[in-house]
Amino acid sequence: DMGASQSTPVCLLKVQLAELNSFSYSVLTQQPGLTKRKAYVNIHVISKTGAGFFRAFQIHEAVLFVTSAVVLLGLPRRFMRFFALNCLGQLSRIYTGVVAPNFNVQCSCAKAVMQLVSQS
């Protein structure tokens, strides 16, 4: 952990010696008994494209993740069903009768038998 955050980002840089003998000499003036030389030290910088990632908590991304998860889990449908079947008073009784009608096995069997008897 490098301690990266939104207020203090961290950048890692790798430095490597490209050439051991990266210097040269040139003669400026040459007189009898005196030679002036200039030394050139060459620095080679090689830049390569790097890759990485940065993690920081963002409230916008967290809210987006939670809302997407809620929609994918189908909670709005369950909430609307609960609201329609329980929170609307008399209208909820009507909706409950349509969505989940009462089914009486004894009455349904008797009705089926009576229809068979009446048609034969």
Image (cartoon, rainbow, N blue to C red):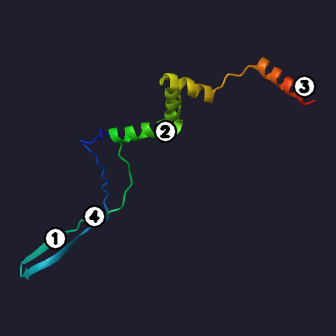
Mark 1 packing: few (<14 Cα in 10 Å), some, or many (20+)?
few
- Residue at 77% from the left image edge and 19% from the top image edge: 107
**Horizontal placement of 115 versus 21: left or right?**
right
Real-space CA distance between mark 2 and mark 1, rounded to the nearest whole angstrom: 70 Å
Look at mark 3 in the image and give the residue it sits on.
Answer: 117
* Residue where numbered disc 2 is placed: 71
Q: Residue 80's x, y, as percent?
A: 50, 32
Name the residue rendered at 50%, 33% in the picture: 75
Residue 106 vs 25, above or below: the answer is above
Instruction: Please give the residue where the numbered disc 4 appears in the rendered image.
Output: 45
For label 3, the SS is helix
Query: Which numbered dot is residue 26?
Result: none
Q: Is residue 112 above or below residue 61?
A: above
- Give the residue pinned by disc 1: 39
Between label 1 and label 3, give the one nearer the viewer. 3
Label 1: which secondary element: strand
What type is the residue that disc 3 sits on? Val
Instruction: Tell which of 32 and 72 is nearer to you.
Output: 72
- Measured as percent of width and height from the top left, residue 12 is found at 31, 49
